[in-house]
Image (tube, rainbow, N blue to C red):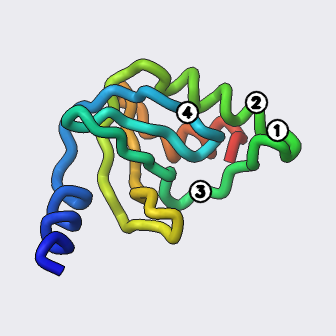
Amino acid sequence: MKLLPLLFAFVFAPSFAHKVIGIADSDTLTLLVDHQTLKIRLANIDAPEKRQTFGQKSKESLSELCWGKDAQYEAQSIDRYKRTVAIVTCRGAGVNREQVRRGMA
């Protein structure tokens, strides 16, 4: 129970730039944070899954925006899969909004 406040402090702390090391699908990416991985689900969007229509194209769009780049995130919550739900910025571009603008979410 003593670790719970520390977990929330880590997850909801202001974000510095972290490297994007994985793109799972069109709304989930993995960051390298202090030598540990952190799965992030993009907040406030509904993007197609990999096997759905446009799922692969949407994933490619997210990869183009973020793969291998530095990203910042603003955590909103934790989902039922223990992913951090967040607003993400890659190289100054608001990724959540950009996926919607591109028609990928």
Q: What residue sits right under mark 3 in the picture?
A: 45
Q: What residue sits right under mark 2 in the picture?
A: 57
The answer to whether residue 31 is left or right of residue 79 is left
Q: Which mark is residue 3?
A: none
User: Looking at the picture, does residue 27 appear above or below residue 34?
Assistant: below
User: Looking at the picture, does residue 55 appear above or below residue 90?
Assistant: below
Circle 4 crowding by C-alpha within 10 Å: few under 14, some 14–19, many from 20: many
Give the residue at the far bottom of this rendering: 1
Do labels 2 and 1 touch, CB within 8 Å? Answer: yes
Q: What residue sits right under mark 1 in the picture?
A: 54
Task: Choose the circle earlier in sequence order: 3 or 4.
Answer: 4
Task: Choose the circle earlier in sequence order: 1 or 4.
Answer: 4
The amino acid type, in three-letter code, at marker 3 is Ile
Do labels 3 and 4 touch, CB within 8 Å? Answer: no
Distance from Cα at disc 4 to Cα at disc 2:
13 Å
Q: Position of residue 74 (x, y in %)?
A: 30, 52
Dot 4: what SS?
strand
Task: Choose the circle earlier in sequence order: 3 or 1.
Answer: 3
Q: Residue at x 76, y 30 (%)?
A: 57
Distance from Cα at disc 3 to Cα at disc 4:
16 Å
Circle 3 crowding by C-alpha within 10 Å: few under 14, some 14–19, many from 20: some
The amino acid type, in three-letter code, at marker 2 is Lys
Task: Choose the circle earlier in sequence order: 4 or 2.
Answer: 4
Dot 3: what SS?
loop
The amino acid type, in three-letter code, at marker 1 is Phe
Which quarter of the figure is the N terminus placed in? bottom left
The amino acid type, in three-letter code, at marker 4 is Ile
Q: Nearer the viewer, residue 38 or 46?
A: 38
